[in-house]
Amino acid sequence: MLAMSRIEEGCTVLILTESGKKYLVAVRRGKKFHSSEGYIDLGELVGREYGCVVRSNTGVRMTAHKPLLQDLLSKVRRITQIVYPKDLGYMVLISGIGPGSVVLEAGTGTGVLTATLAYYVRPTGRVFSYDINQEYLEAAHYTLERLGLREYVELKHGDVYSEVSEKDVDAVFLDVPEPWKAVGNAWKALKPSGRLLSLSPTIEQVVETVENLRVGGFDDISCVEILVRDIRVKRGMTRPEFLMRGHTAYIVSARKSEINSRHITDDTWNENISPT
Ligand SMILES: C[S@@+](CC[C@H](N)C(=O)[O-])C[C@H]1O[C@@H](n2cnc3c(N)ncnc32)[C@H](O)[C@@H]1O
């Protein structure tokens, strides 16, 4: 679905209307797409190139674009908090993953991060995604199937704080309430120099995670928050929008290194961070 250049029957298009509204629509001959700005015959789109312009019955201009992964993800039914595009982009870039990478992730939740990781590691890579909640795994299974990404993901019912069976993974992504409890398992699963990315909504979670990373065999530890402002562009009046998405999460990143035993004290060394 993401690779074709001409619109075929059965594929999904992103209809962008003159007023800026966006709709994901399955193309079928004999079917109409109805909106508040009029309707179009979907059969008219078959065989045309993506980006083609059609007029609704009321004369409104509508463009049929090829949906990006982000367009598809924006319509996924959310059953948990999700990772937002501004955070996804940064996390993927600094993780160093690409086609062929093997990734360990927890928790799966709605599957937005899972789908993004699968998209970037395909066709030869794999994502091992853990969640303690079977219902979420089932919903993520359905979402990944609809996105055509299911074959790149192994969904695993399990607690990332207790045990993971993967070894030599290129990167670990954590979006769980107590990521510091997964630091030891992440260390064991990662390749030497592998990347750990952890996403948390509160500073308290960040402090706990970073302190455990420092003594748990990680270095190059950093924490960022990404803020994105939309800019309204109109000659003579160009300025940031008044409203923006505020806080979503802090992103902690680190690289696996050799354990530096000088940093380990009886207070800090416990089961959660022990890498052996
Ligand atoms: C915020 S959601 C993850 C959302 C996901 N990253 C997304 O983009 O859709 C957090 C998930 O972590 C799962 N979880 C909590 N504790 C866990 C644990 N110890 N091991 C694995 N998953 C866990 C929860 O069940 C929940 O689905």
Image (cartoon, rainbow, N blue to C red):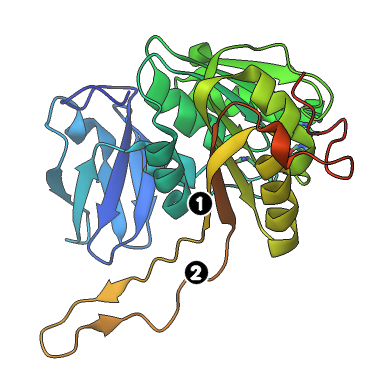
**Disc on res. 75:** none
Q: Secondary structure at mark 1?
A: loop
Q: Considering only vertical position in the picture, is 207 above or below 255?
A: below
- The answer to whether residue 147 shows anywhere in this view is no
Identify the residue at horizontal 16%, vertical 81% (top origin): 234
Identify the residue at horizontal 47%, vertical 41% (top origin): 73
The reply to whether dot 1 and dot 2 touch (C-beta < 8 Å) is: yes
Identify the residue at horizontal 74%, vertical 17% (top origin): 164
Residue reaching furthest to the bottom: 236
Name the quarter showing ligand 1: top right
Residue 22 horizontal side relative to residue 45, left or right: right
**Disc on res. 245:** 2
Nearest the eye: 263 or 107: 263
Pick the quarter of the image with the N terminus.
top left
Residue 44 horizontal side relative to residue 85, left or right: left
Residue 235 horizontal side relative to residue 167, left or right: left
**Does the residue tagged 1 have its C-beta within 8 Å of any atom of ligand 1?**
no
- Using the numbered discs, state the Cα–Cα distance from disc 1 to disc 2 in whole angstroms: 10 Å
**Residue 204 x, y percent position in the rendering:** 75, 61
Q: Secondary structure at mark 2?
A: loop
**Residue 131 x, y percent position in the rendering:** 74, 28
Residue 58 image-quadrant placement: bottom left
Q: Which residue is mark 1?
A: 84
Q: Amino acid at mark 2?
A: Arg
- The answer to whether residue 264 shows anywhere in this view is yes
Q: Amino acid at mark 1?
A: Tyr
